[in-house]
Each structure stands twice: as C-alpha cells, then as structure tokens.
Amino acid sequence: MAEGRLYEVVEPTAPLRQAPSPDAPLDTEALKGERVTVYESEEGWARGKLEADGYAGFLPASALRAPGAAPTHKVAALRTLVFPGPSIKLPPLEGLALGCRLAIARIEDAFAITAAGGYVPARHLVSIDERESDFVAVAERFLGAPYLWGGKTSLGLDCSGLLQVALGACGIASPRDSAVQEKAVGKELSVPYSELRRGDLVFWKRHVAIVRDAASLVHANAFHMAVVFEPIAQAITRIRAAGSEVTSMRRLDLAGS
C-alpha cells in the first residue's frame, strides 16, 4: 500500500464504509480525536486506515483534517455535550461519545475548554491516560442502546463494537470484528457454562457476548435490537435455535485473574 498521510477525526463520529458512498455498508465508526492514515481522496471520500485498530475503508473527507494538538483528555461519560460558552443554557455545538479524545487548553470552574474553544463539562472527562478498572461495568452502561451494525456509540453499536469500546476504556487494545477478537482476546476456556465468571467472553460465529456473572451476560444483538442483559442458558438456547452453536469461550488475564 502506498505511503499515506496522517489525519485526525474532527466530527463526533465518522463512518468508515466499504465503498466511497453514503449508501455503502457501515463497517465501523471512528471517534473524534482518532488518527487516520489516508492514502487517497476523491469526490469527498478518503480511503484510509484507522490508527487504533488498523481497520481500513472509506471515510467522509469532511470529517478529517491535519492533526491538531495532541489529545490530553477523553470522554468518560456515555455521552457529553460541547457548548459554545461557559453555560449549559447555550445551544450545544455537538454531542460526543464515550472514548472521544480532546485537546484541552485549560479548565475553568465546571468546564474544560478545548483547544478549539468548546466548553465541555469537566466531570465528563478524564486524563487521556486514565483507565477504567472493570470493562464489564463499562459495557453494562450501554444497556438499552440500540443495535447498529458497525456502530461504536450509545446511539447504536454492535456486539464487537461494545466489546472493543469497553476494553478500550480500560486501556486494552482489541480488534474490531468478533471473528478476529475470538482469536486475539484472552485465552480459550474449556469449562462448563456454569463455571463462567464475570469478564469471560462467549463467542458464536459472527457474535460475542460478555459474561456478567455465573448466570447472565451483556451483549448487543439483532434479536433484541439493543444491548441487553440475558441469562446465559437462554441466550445459548435461543441462538442455537437460530442455527448457531457456541464456537469458544475465552478469559482475559486481568489483574492476575
């Protein structure tokens, strides 16, 4: 592949599509502050690769610009708003999702002021290096979010997006697609379903769920069209009836677990 040029995502989210068309399938989303290597641009579309996970495709060129100041903070709330001044009564400029990265120039009272002059509630941000301690708890916060193939925010996300975002909040890099996650994340388990524990992963063909406890899991799925908590046995039975068996179970080595 030819040498590319580094850009930054400046929109709250940027769709990465299979082809340079707004009607092309959505493969994933890039969040504000992410870096993208762009190899060519034509007719409003940039062909590039996301720095974070290596996913390649086509993004709207209008969502990208040359990199600005390095991000200093990231959004830790499920969603937050950017205001044009130091008042929550002003019409918001944009909404940002968990994981968006921002360059903060200074903090005044309750607001963090971005390098671009936006005002963000400071309590919704953390230092770029801060890590969540429980990726399952992060995933649980998305309960009720609608299912969206390729999505990565509370406005819509899919099963592997939920896992990637939750792990990312804890500083754990993850591939984007469940088939690749199944090979790369954690170590395979050979235990009865009754011995699964919080943080274990259950994989089917093209699907992944996160175990909450010995009896339930959390996953974004097209059956419920949402992120739901579901009994493990019920999910296995339901998905089996649809023609798919569990392909593996995996456990991450977190904090010596």
Image (cartoon, grey):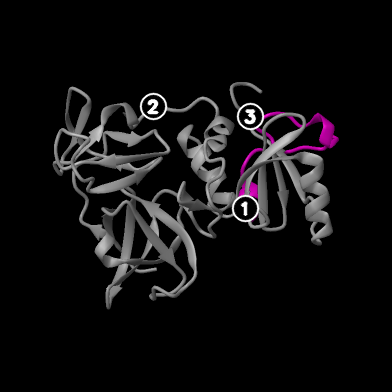
- Where does the C terminus fall, quadrant-wise? top right
Compare marks 3 and 1 and give the one earlier in the sequence. Answer: 1
Q: Considering depth in this image, is 185 or 19 the residue closer to the camera? A: 19
Q: On the rendered structure, is 213 left or right of 36?
A: right
Residue type, numbered disc 3: Asp
Residue 231, quarter of picture: top right
Residue 195: % across, % down = 81, 29
Residue type, numbered disc 2: Glu
Q: Which residue is mark 2?
A: 130
Compare marks 2 and 1 and give the one earlier in the sequence. Answer: 2
Q: Which residue is mark 3?
A: 253
- Where does the N terminus fall, quadrant-wise? bottom left
Residue type, numbered disc 1: Ser
Q: State which region is magenta.
A: 178-200
Element marked by disc 2? loop
Q: On the rendered structure, is 240 left or right of 101?
A: right
Element marked by disc 1? helix
Residue at point 24% right, 35% down?
Answer: 120
Q: Considering depth in this image, is 213 or 93 the residue closer to the camera? A: 93
